[in-house]
Image (cartoon, rainbow, N blue to C red):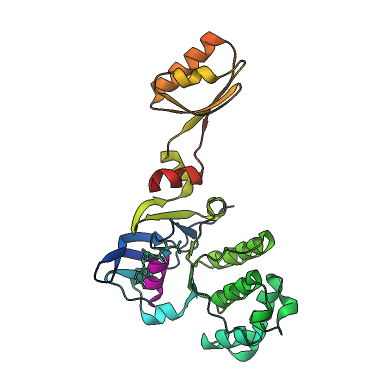
Amino acid sequence: MSPQHTDGPDLEVRDLTRVFGAGPVRAVDGVSFTAPSGLLTGFVGANGAGKTTTMRMIMGVLAITSGEVRFGGRPATTQDRRTFGYMPEERGLYPKQAVLDQLVYLARLRGIDATAARAEVLDHLDRLGLAGRARDHVEKLSLGNQQRVQIIAALMGAPRALILDEPFSGLDPAAVEGMVDLLREHTARGVPVLFSSHQLDLVERLCERLVVLKQGRVVADGAPADLQSTGTVRHRLVVSGDAGWARGVPGIHAIDVDGPTALVEAVDDTAVQRLLTTALERGAVHELTPVRPTLAQIYREVTA
Ligand SMILES: Nc1ncnc2c1ncn2[C@@H]1O[C@H](COP(=O)(O)OP(=O)(O)OP(=O)(O)O)[C@@H](O)[C@H]1O
């Protein structure tokens, strides 16, 4: 069963704006969206679109030019933010300290007592396949394993919201699955999870909500299925002979023709009917089906 929005606190940004320098660069320009309690919200956009800048403002590590961050229906306080788990873009581990010591130290900064911190860290290390590396210095770990340690640092101490800047980058498939399971445990507690990613296939598989940024502005926001139903619907046509003739049908744009199969975009329903009529005039029609756009296709459309 897919997760539902819960009654826990939503994380919300309203008209959030950040201007850099005298130029000036409006890195984030009036961004508003909600990361609902209990759901995974994917945050996507090209390099430089403003994802990291938005996340830094949510965490209060970068000053807001205007707008606000809200948590549980009121402006987020410093105290709220101390309860958020954050995985920053710049990974901040100490290379020369043992993994276990470092994570226990970070957990204790969150107010967890030493025994509980140690137990929680060991459990997380085990879950992410790092049980045997607890005593190693961080610098001895591969980049992917350092990334796992960084993830654990963000997830400890029952955070009330999770803000994760590219948490999946550099992870192998097993670590991705382990990470997804962990995140689901947090959403099941009603935690809003906002994570940025360039891996659209992963975002499509995981997210209940999606926010797409382009040049500092939100260009799409909603449930992936809703966005897919508003994107350009394509049709797949399969006929008995060569389908190359579909290229010449008015109102039809053939994306790809491969022998008897054509993938097309139609300007409207009339064009689809015209395509079908023409196909029937020419011979047998084996299939004419709408093809729901992939997230990658929607992403291309809204960021074009
Ligand atoms: N400290 C800064 N000073 C000046 N400009 C900055 C600063 N930080 C970010 N920017 C600019 O703000 C814009 C948004 O950058 P940001 O890092 O938020 O994008 P992003 O979507 O996270 O990109 P990526 O996917 O590459 O991580 C970029 O044009 C960037 O150059």
- The majority secondary structure of the magenta stretch comes to helix
Q: Is residue 124 left or right of residue 32?
A: right
Looking at the image, the residue that sits furthest to the right is 132
Q: Residue at x 53, y 79 (%)?
A: 92
Name the foreground residue: 89 vs 201.
89
Left of 182 or right of it: where is 250? Answer: left
Picture quadrant of ligand 1: bottom left
Does 237 lie within the magenta span? Answer: no
Q: Find residue 186 and report its horizontal and vertical position in percent.
A: 55, 68
- When asked about the image quadrant of residue 65, the answer is bottom left
Which quarter of the rendering shows the C terminus? top left
Residue segment shown in magenta: 52-61
Please say whether residue 61 is visible from this viewpoint: yes
Where is residue 5 drawn, in percent x and y? 47, 58
Which residue in the rendered view is the most extreme toward the top?
281
At horizontal 70% and vertical 82% (from top left) the residue drawn is 134
Residue visible at 65% across and 89% down?
A: 115
